[in-house]
């Protein structure tokens, strides 16, 4: 592609700002499904409501009294005056009700699962927009617990709590008028304990919410501990800290149990309140008996009334559960909101085109933490295809420069350009497509070697993979593996050495054919001769995205000067500033820090050390 070509390329679309969905918003996409499930719930309740009426009619038949409320059987056009249609009716209601109950649960519980899946997907996608800074400040374990156990609470809220809440509303709305129609006086007396239940429910809700927050926080800490101990197993063993870690874990575990118990107690406090429904039944029998004596009600009516109060009993008991599950869901949603509310501090710019690899920094000053300067007033110019070597002591700002270019750390406007465009104006997808970054600590996935190599280019051909294997001096290593490229590496497979992992990470980056390659001491665990050879062959270039062989622009950080010896320019950093710059020869002639470091490296080499 000729210089200056600005043809657009396909990159991932712009992400909308993350929303903080409230509970209602979570369910909005599922209104149809909700209506469907509610329909089945209504039918289930209608069938259940018919049963006490039929019992009443049956008793009236047995007693030989006439049914004053009007016969349900007659209304349905069924034969009256005989017992068998009553019995058959009750049986049918029970059978049909069982079926529709199952339907309502299948449909409504699925809403919960869908809501959980959607929210998890949204949260996961949001996590990938957050910057490395955010990840440094947050525990992996805690984030994991939010994506797992908190999501489970959302599912229970969306399934169990929603279904039972709907059911409670339906049962109360349908039963209350019927009970009142039977006899106002008896009904009001029987329903007297209900306001107490409502007050109790509200008090419980607040406590359950607060305690759930505590439990989820403890769970987050526990997950963090597990995760760090798994990741740091070797360190724990090397320092024989197993017992201490076990004790620390036990304390964490105990704390979780303590908080879970507190939550359980808060939930349990409602159970006796929910049981007050039974008190209502006793009152109904007492007042109903008097009404029968007075001739206002039949025995059948009192039985129907009691049966209806029993039907109100479960929704009232369930109220405690609904509240607890609902409050747990609400607390979990807040924790998920905390993730969704995190704003990426590095955002997409508008420029999306192929990277050419021209780098220019003018007075580049990068703060790595508030008030802490990682780079100060840096000036560099690297033409396309050229090599810049970056050396300096630990903490001198080498990685910071590469991170600023890769847009991994925020960078002030107007100080750093790529292809003449401020890095802040680059679309992240487009930039990452053309800029390869290889860090010192290479992370590989538990997958085959081939898939690790092709991570950034799943469509890479076998020939392309062979090419990078050779380029990164991996041929012998691949041949020595039991199944070559198909060998599983990482946690569930062969453990590669540090140097092997580094070369795989480099090959993985090269396979994406970047126009700008940033090597952050990424061959530190490889011997110096191999490192120099690899850098030299990168310099000769590889087949690029346009099909032609071209050399990428290379920024090479190395603690070994031998690796940057051939660079077009070398900058020596100290405390974030360029203290010397020039070619290898010029720097040696200058006799400054570089010459000093070079001398030291040569002496160590003369003593047989591979520095
Ligand atoms: N996230 C960070 N928070 C605070 N200080 C940081 C952070 N990252 C880097 N630094 C500091 O910035 C300076 C430059 O770091 P870095 O560029 O990584 O050095 P180098 O790669 O040359 O060893 C160092 O003093 C380092 O301690
Ligand atoms: Mg570094």
Image (tube, rainbow, N blue to C red):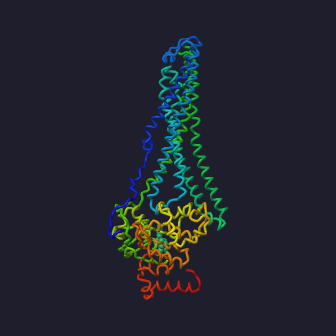
Does 526 sit above or below residue 101? below
Residue 74 position within the rendered picture, expressed as x and y whole percent measured from the top left: 50, 15
Q: Quadrant of residue 83?
A: top right
- 243 or 50, nearer to the observer: 50
**Whole-percent x, y for residue 198 in the image:** 50, 35
Q: Looking at the rendering, in which quadrant would you find the N terminus? A: bottom left
Could you say which quadrant of the image residue 264 lies in? top right
**Image-based side of 88 in relation to 371, left or right:** right
User: Which one is in front, 348 or 173?
Assistant: 348
Any part of residue 404 in sight = no
Q: Tell whether 268 sits left or right of 506.
A: right
The residue shown at (52%, 52%) is: 146
Residue 246 vertical placement versus 54 (above, below): below
Residue 92 lies, in percent from the top left, at 56, 23
Vertical arrangement, residue 218 with respect to residue 155, above or below: below
Residue 177, compared with residue 421, is above or below; it is: above
Q: Residue at x 50, y 20 (%)?
A: 182
């Amino acid at each position: 592609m000729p210089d200056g070509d600005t043809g657009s390329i396909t990159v991932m679309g712009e992400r909308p700002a993350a929303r903080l969905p409230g509970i209602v918003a979570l369910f909005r996409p599922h209104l149809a499904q909700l209506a469907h499930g509610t329909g089945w719930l209504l039918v289930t309740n209608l069938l259940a409501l018919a049963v006490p009426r039929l019992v009443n009619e049956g008793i009236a038949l047995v007693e030989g009294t006439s049914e004053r409320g009007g016969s349900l059987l007659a209304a349905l056009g069924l034969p009256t005056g005989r017992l068998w249609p009553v019995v058959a009716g009750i049986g049918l209601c029970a059978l049909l009700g069982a079926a529709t109950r199952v339907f309502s649960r299948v449909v409504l519980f699925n809403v919960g699962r869908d809501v959980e899946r959607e929210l998890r997907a949204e949260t996961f996608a949001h996590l990938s927009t957050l910057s490395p800074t955010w990840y440094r400040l947050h525990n992996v374990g805690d984030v994991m617990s939010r994506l797992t156990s908190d999501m489970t609470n959302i599912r229970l809220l969306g399934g169990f709590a929603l279904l039972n809440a709907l059911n409670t509303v339906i049962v109360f709305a349908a039963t209350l008028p019927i009970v009142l129609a039977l006899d106002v006086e008896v009904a009001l007396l029987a329903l007297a304990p209900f306001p107490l239940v409502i007050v109790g429910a509200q008090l419980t809700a607040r406590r359950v919410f607060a305690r759930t927050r505590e439990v989820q926080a403890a769970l987050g800490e526990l997950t963090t501990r597990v995760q760090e101990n798994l990741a740091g197993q070797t360190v724990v063993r090397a320092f024989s800290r197993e017992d201490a870690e076990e004790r620390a874990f036990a304390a964490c575990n105990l704390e979780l149990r303590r908080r879970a118990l507190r939550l359980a107690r808060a939930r349990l406090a409602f159970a006796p309140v929910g049981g007050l429904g039974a008190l209502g039944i006793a009152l109904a029998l007492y007042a109903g008996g008097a009404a029968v004596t007075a001739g206002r009600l039949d025995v059948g009516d009192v039985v129907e009334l009691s049966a209806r109060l029993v039907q109100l009993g479960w929704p009232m008991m369930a109220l405690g559960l609904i509240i607890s599950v609902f409050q747990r869901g609400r607390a979990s949603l807040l924790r998920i909101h905390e993730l969704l509310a995190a704003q990426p501090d590095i955002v997409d710019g508008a420029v999306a085109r192929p990277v050419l690899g021209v780098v220019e920094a003018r007075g580049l000053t990068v703060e790595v933490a508030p008030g802490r300067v990682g780079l100060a007033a840096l000036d560099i110019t690297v033409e396309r295809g050229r090599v810049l070597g970056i050396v300096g002591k630990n903490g001198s700002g080498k990685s910071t420069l590469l991170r600023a270019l890769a847009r991994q750390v925020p960078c002030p406007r107007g100080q750093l350009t790529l292809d003449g465009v401020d890095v802040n104006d680059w679309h992240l997808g487009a930039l990452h497509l053309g800029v390869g970054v290889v860090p010192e600590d290479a992370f590989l996935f538990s997958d085959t070697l081939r898939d690790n190599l092709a991570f950034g280019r799943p469509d890479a051909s076998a020939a392309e993979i062979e090419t990078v294997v050779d380029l990164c001096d991996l041929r012998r290593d691949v041949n020595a593996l039991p199944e070559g490229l198909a060998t599983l590496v990482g946690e569930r497979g062969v453990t590669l050495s540090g140097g092997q992992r580094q070369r795989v990470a480099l090959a993985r980056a090269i396979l994406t054919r970047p126009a700008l390659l940033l090597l952050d001491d990424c061959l530190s665990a490889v011997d110096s001769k191999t490192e120099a050879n690899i850098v030299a062959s990168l310099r000769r270039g590889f087949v690029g995205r346009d099909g032609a062989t071209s050399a990428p622009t290379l920024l090479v950080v190395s603690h070994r000067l031998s690796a940057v010896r051939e660079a077009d320019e070398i900058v020596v950093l100290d405390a974030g500033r360029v203290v010397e710059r020039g070619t290898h020869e010029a720097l040696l002639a200058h006799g400054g820090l570089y010459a000093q470091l070079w001398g030291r490296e040569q002496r160590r080499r003369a003593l047989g050390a591979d520095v």
